[in-house]
């Protein structure tokens, strides 16, 4: 039976669009943090109550929103970040679609307070699709956005949320991504009055230690690599930071956290002869790529991106990690070339494995497997795709 074709109401359209961007408290936090960073904030404070379901409040010291523009901030397709189609391939901000705040406001109550420089700020509230008048907000510096009662009007979505413990884990993971991508920015996270994170502006190495634990800083190999117009920086972990589960692999494209199996496989490929299958090295890497070589507008959450030449990036990334691994090896005295069988004598699967000998054995493994680092890596990489 044919049902009549009819246009969806604006409210329903907004809720459908919101579903693409906001699926849990952590994704609200992602969108709000992106806006703070785009506003040039150097300090961002996050407060959540009931794992973000009751309240998410983010305060930044960025450039703020002019009072007269406050009513537009939550309108769909309203943005200060792009103006023309050409701009889509010159994106230097994390946001550009002009829909995050509109999406959040369609599934939660949103209050925005903001001020520009030392001018008196303004405050606006959006509840049930209705916006309040802008009222004065004295004393505010930068922007504070408060999101309350997430999914109060979309109970089906609310039912998909996991326990508060799990949602909090997602929030911490999300904040970590930003904290690692922007170590110069100070971040704090409080959950139900408990301090979870408090990072001052610092170098990436210090931020990694603060995020994971202090032992990480002794097990990091710097990556600094340039090839043509690509630049790769960050750190990869020694074998002491190899884990049997994924989760500590952070790949950023122009400081945007991305998930890309092919590029992850490039890193794994560089480690190929050093770790076993099912073992995951630690890395925090930022790829600087000209904006016209990447399409960010392929996924509403912008976590997946498309590259003009993904294999070129794969190759450069793998070379950068291989170089980082070998630069460490070059500083270690030569302990003689072991037989191939001995290459894996210090593998973590060996009962006599001694983690303190990692570096020595690392060299031994590297020497005889140099070729496999370069050629077989690609074969192995294909298995991860
Ligand atoms: N914390 C903030 N500081 C300054 N301006 C902000 C802040 N948050 C939002 N804005 C302003 O509100 C506008 C709308 O924000 P919103 O997140 O909805 O869209 P966007 O960031 O432009 O694009 P996207 O939907 O991709 O995130 C932004 O373009 C920006 O001008
Ligand atoms: Mg945004």
Image (cartoon, rainbow, N blue to C red):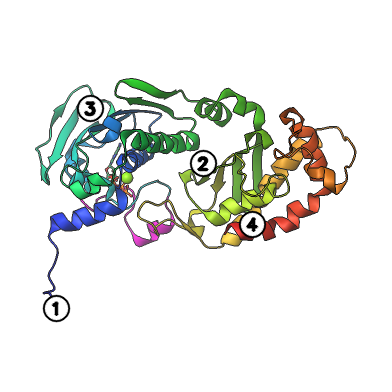
Which marked residue is nearer to the observer: mark 4 or mark 3? 4
Q: Earlier in the sequence, mark 3 or mark 1?
A: 1
Label 4 near ligand 1 (CB < 8 Å): no
Q: Where is residue 239 in the image (x, y as percent from the top left)?
A: 68, 37
Question: Around disc 1, counting alpha carbons within 10 Å, would you say few (fewer than 14), some (14 to 19), or many (20 or more)?
Answer: few
| Nearer to the camera, 138 or 168 | 168
User: Distance from label 4 to label 2 (Cα)?
Assistant: 18 Å
Crowd rating for badge 3 (residues with CA inside 10 Å; few <14, some 14–19, many 20+):
some
Residue picked out by circle 2: 247
Nearest-to-viewer mark from 4 and 1: 1
Reading the image, the residue beneath label 1 is 2
Residue 381's disc is: 4
Q: Earlier in the sequence, mark 1 or mark 2?
A: 1
- Looking at marks 4 and 3 on the same chain, the residue that comes earlier in the sequence is marked by 3
Contact between marks 3 and 1 (CB within 8 A): the answer is no
Q: Are marks 4 and 3 in contact (CB under 8 Å)?
A: no
Task: Identify the residue at image location x=65%, y=36%.
Answer: 222
Asked whether mark 1 lies closer than 8 Å to ligand 1, one says no
Q: Which residue is drawn at 46% across and 45% down?
A: 256
Respond yes or no on whether mark 2 lies under 8 Å from ligand 1. Answer: no
In the image, the segment drawn in magenta is 74-91
| Disc nearer the start of the sequence (4/2) | 2
Q: Residue 119 carries which label?
A: 3
Q: Residues within 10 Å of mark 2 (few under 14, many from 20)?
A: few
């Amino acid at each position: 039976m044919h049902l009549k074709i009819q246009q969806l109401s604006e409210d329903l359209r907004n809720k459908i669009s919101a579903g693409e961007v906001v699926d849990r408290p952590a994704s609200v936090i992602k969108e709000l943090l992106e806006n703070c960073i785009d506003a040039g904030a150097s300090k961002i404070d996050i407060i959540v109550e009931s794992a973000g379901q009751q309240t998410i409040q983010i305060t930044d010291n960025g450039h703020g929103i002019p009072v007269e523009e406050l009513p537009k901030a939550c309108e769909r397709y309203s943005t200060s970040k792009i103006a023309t189609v050409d701009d889509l391939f010159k994106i230097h901000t994390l946001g550009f679609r002009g829909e995050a705040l509109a999406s959040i406001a369609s599934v939660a109550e949103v209050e925005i307070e903001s001020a520009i420089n030392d001018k008196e700020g303004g405050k606006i509230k959006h509840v049930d699709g209705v916006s309040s008048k802008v009222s004065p907000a004295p004393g505010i510096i930068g922007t504070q956005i408060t999101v309350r009662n997430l999914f109060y009007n979309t109970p089906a979505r609310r039912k998909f949320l996991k326990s508060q413990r799990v949602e909090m884990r997602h929030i911490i993971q999300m904040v970590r991504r930003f904290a690692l991508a922007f170590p110069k920015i100070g971040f704090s996270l409080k959950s139900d009055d408990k301090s979870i994170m408090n990072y001052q502006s610092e170098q990436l190495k210090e931020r990694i230690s603060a995020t994971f634990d202090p032992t990480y800083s002794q097990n990091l190999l710097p990556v600094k690599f340039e090839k043509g117009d690509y630049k790769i920086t960050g750190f990869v972990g020694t074998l002491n930071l190899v884990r049997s589960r994924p989760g500590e692999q952070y790949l950023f494209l122009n400081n945007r956290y991305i998930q890309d199996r092919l590029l992850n496989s490039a890193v794994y490929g560089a480690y190929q002869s050093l770790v076993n299958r099912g073992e995951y090295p630690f890395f925090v890497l930022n790829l600087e790529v000209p904006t016209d070589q990447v399409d960010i507008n392929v996924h509403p959450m912008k976590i997946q991106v498309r590259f003009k030449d993904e294999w070129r990036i794969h190759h450069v990334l793998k070379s950068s990690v291989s170089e980082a691994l070998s630069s460490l090896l070059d500083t270690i005295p030569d302990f003689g070339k072991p037989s191939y069988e001995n290459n894996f004598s210090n593998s973590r699967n060996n009962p006599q494995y001694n983690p303190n000998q990692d570096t020595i054995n690392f060299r031994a493994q590297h020497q005889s497997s140099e070729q496999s680092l370069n050629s077989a890596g690609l074969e192995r990489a294909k298995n991860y795709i």
